[in-house]
Image: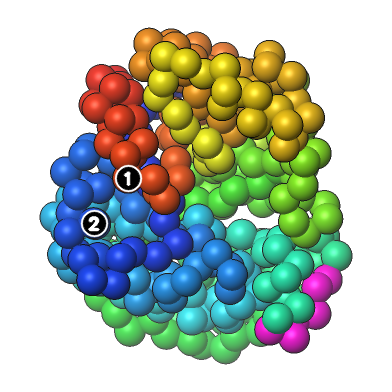
Amino acid sequence: MSTHPFRFGVQVSNLPASNWRERARKIEALGYATLFVPDHFSASLWDPTTMLGGVAAVTEHLKVGTLVYGIDYRHPVIYARQAATLQIISNGRHEFGLGAGWMVEDYQWAGLHYDRPSIRIERLDEALTIIRSMWSNETTTFSGKHYQVTEVPLKLELDPATPPPILIGGGGRKLLGVAGRHADIVGINPMLPEGRITAETPLDMTPERMTEKIEWLRCAAEDAGRDFDAIELNALVFTIAVTDDSKPIYELIASSTGLSRDQIVDSPLFLVGSADEITDKLEQRREQTGISYIVVQGDDMAQLELFAEHVVVPLAGR
């Protein structure tokens, strides 16, 4: 298994209105590689694309990305133009995350029909075919089950050799199959069949389940004639806590999820413990699974700073 260098990102749903520039620059200065925004009507308080354009404008090295856009919220032609624009104005710092959509509340609030997962995954597959074509061809014509476009141009000076890397997160075999065919970065996620995060969600991220999911991805990439080792594997962490007294945090997580301490320790959704314990865990997990791109929640700046000092700085790029 190829080993990618460690990278670390931060996911934020919004930035402080009074000092958003300073917060974005602080995240960059701490050593994080990427600022991500989710795309949910409840969790994403700021519009993702607008926010990322602003962050790109006030930072120098920080990559900007979505984790992830929902396929049913915008047409793929719009996504292709948005991503290409962000790639240009950020000077090549955009990571384009796109998924099949999963949060049932988004669909209910917007009056969108919540199709079964297989239909949404079909749409994602077709959309990515259109988007990749628009990034590399003068015009794109596509006729599929869900989308039809006719000689649509991009008309942006996007270098076809350096399009935005595509990030897809998934937990099921069909979605990871699409990721294996299209994605440059793949988030290994829990399945969310109920359309929401529940106490059972972490149970789908045991070491055995992670191994199975990565094997699905490997098979799909190889079937598509792609080099699996070139794909960067990503994990979104629910909770980080750099502490020498992890017992109360483990107890809190256990009470809300029903997981045992060992299950919490083994899950990539939680990074709790001393700096040495966390860095050892990440290095061991990378060796076992290949996961090297770690994204943490950005709500608690004090923990972000601790995590950056004790984990990001020692590991990033190694």
Residue at the location (21% across, 66% down)?
19
In this rendering, would 68 be left or right of 115? left
Residue 122 in the image: x percent, y percent? 75, 64
**Is 117 on the left-hand or right-hand side of 251?**
right
Residue 84 visible? The answer is no
Callout 1: few (<14), some (14-19), or many (20+) C-alpha neighbours within 10 Å?
few
| Residue 104 visible | yes
Q: Main secondary structure of the magenta part?
A: loop
User: Quadrant location of the C terminus?
Assistant: top left
Q: Where on the picture, by quarter, is residue 80?
A: bottom left
Residue wearing tag 1: 301
The answer to whether 154 is drawn above or below residue 23 in the figure is below
Whole-percent x, y for residue 2 in the image? 46, 20
Quick check: is 113 in the magenta stretch? yes
Residue 23 is tagged as: 2
The residue segment tinted magenta is: 110-115
Residue 141 location, quadrant: bottom right
Labels 2 and 1: the sequence-earlier one: 2
Q: Amino acid at mark 2?
A: Arg
* Helix, strand or loop for disc 2: helix
